[in-house]
Image (cartoon, rainbow, N blue to C red):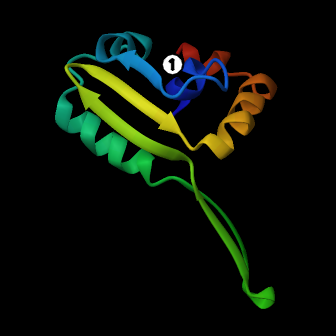
Amino acid sequence: MVYVIISTEDTTNEAEIFSKKDFESQFELCNYNEHEAYVDSKKLSSLQLQSIDLEKDVFHITNVFSSFNYQNELFVISWNKRLLSTILNLKISVNLTDFKSQ
């Protein structure tokens, strides 16, 4: 997820697109295979933001991502458009430098 945040540049992009090779290079991975990509994408695709107050009969659930696609060693990941500005603000306010080197 950190890599997708790092890759996110602005609110005009429909999706973040990056190659398997770039992803492997960023995290010094060798042979990140399609099955691992599928398992990781499935886990990330289920990320949600939730706000629950059952005493007031209120809850909100929002999916963080709208889609994950992988084909020919290319990832195409789409944020939930309602969260994109929040993600960009997070990118600005949190020092992601430490994650870039890991």
Q: 14 or 4, which lies in front?
A: 14
Among the 4 quarters of the image, the one containing residue 89: top right
Vertical relation: 87 (above or below) 10: below
Residue at (42, 48) in percent of width and height: 45
Mark 1, other Cα within 10 Å: few <14 / some 14–19 / many ≥20: few
What amino acid is at disc 1? Gln
**Residue 21 image position (x, y, % from top left):** 30, 11
Q: 53 or 81, which lies in front?
A: 81
Labels in figure, total: 1
Vertical relation: 88 (above or below) 39: above
Residue at (19, 20) in percent of width and height: 72
Residue at (40, 17) in percent of width and height: 18
Q: Is residue 69 left or right of residue 61?
A: left
SS at mark 1 in the image: loop
Q: Is residue 3 left or right of residue 94?
A: left
Q: Which residue is mark 1?
A: 102
